Image (cartoon, rainbow, N blue to C red):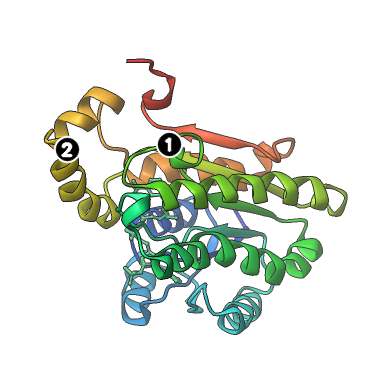
Amino acid sequence: MTELDGKRFFITGSAAGIGRGIAELAISRGARVVISDIDADAAERTAHDIGAAGVANCDVTDEASVVEAIAAAEGLLGGIDVLVNNAGIEVAAPLAEQSTESFDRIFAVNVRGPFVATKAAVPALKRSGGNIVNIASIAGTGGSPLLGSYCATKAALIQLTRVAAVELRASGIRVNAVCPGFADTTMVDRLRPEFEAATAVPFGDLVAAQQGRLGTAKDIAEVACFLASDRASWVTGSHYVLDGGLTASLI
Ligand code: NAP
């Protein structure tokens, strides 16, 4: 018997990166996982490669598609025990130079998306006594130049986590968040040149000095899978920082 035997996961944005890492680790620990992404071809490939139970795609900015995908996942799995709100995007721009359209877009994906998916999944999670893991960021706990709107979305997601945990406690649904530092995914590949241009410091040096090394999807999946498991049965309303000490350091 492994830790996640019989647990049924629905993970947004899980064709790649951290979402895929969570899916892989959960499956290796006995879970059945439905992959969901905005990129349907990548979702199919990932589901095939990692042995997922199925695919139910959605764009988290499209409420109807989220409701439909969660219903499809419940049908495929016979229920849902774990919703992972992982889909997220970044914008690298100083606040005063960012367009209002791109500000609205990042809130639509990173905050409205988890809000809509949470609402859609709560009936299924009430039936299963399940839980929610939100993939926030250390950007939600402090400010970073170039990432102003991203920081604001992740702070909002931490607050949604807290309030949902309190409101859903009586229903037996736990809600937690994970706050990674920089991790080795295509999101960071996109950020690397922007940070180098802004700081004139090689990104590798910045990461080595601040957090030792880049995180991996597996580093984050370990904590997400713990939070999703019954071992975390008294953990709710929490946000777990995984950043190699970045936010602990004053220098
Ligand atoms: P990633 O490599 O860009 O992967 C994100 C996945 O989500 C991609 O498959 C992407 O598809 C998909 N996606 C994007 N917009 C979507 C939408 N509207 N609906 C459904 N799926 C969508 O990113 P990641 O680094 O794995 O990030 C995953 C989560 O971790 C995000 O919430 C991010 O903010 C958070 N996080 C990441 C880091 C980091 O350093 N990487 C650190 C802290 C927190 P496309 O590729 O087609 O857009």
- Residue 208 in the image: above or below residue 167: above
Give the residue type at disc 2.
Answer: Phe
Question: Residue at the spot x=88%, y=49% of the render?
Answer: 170
29 and 114: which one is in front? 114
At 15% from the left edge and 35% from the top edge, which residue is drawn? 204
Residue 122: x and y in percent read 74, 65
Is 30 on the left-hand or right-hand side of 17? right
Badge 2 marks a residue whose secondary structure is helix
Q: Is residue 128 above or below residue 243?
A: below
Up the image or down, 22 lies above or below 74; here it is above
Q: Which residue is mark 2?
A: 203
Q: Position of residue 221 (x, y in %)?
A: 45, 46
Q: Can you see residue 73? A: yes
Residue furthest to the right: 170
Residue on which the image places disc 1? 143
- Observer-nearest of 101 and 55: 101
**Whether the residue under disc 2 has CB within 8 Å of ligand 1:** no
Ligand 1's image quarter is bottom left
Which badge, 1 or 2, is on the more N-terminal residue? 1
In the figure, is residue 1 to the left or right of 163? left
Mark 1: which amino acid?
A: Gly
Drawn side of residue 60 relative to residue 48, left or right: right
In this picture, residue 19 sits left or right of residue 16? right
Q: Position of residue 29 (x, y in %)?
A: 50, 50
Query: Which residue is at a point 36% across and 47% down the rendered structure image?
Result: 147
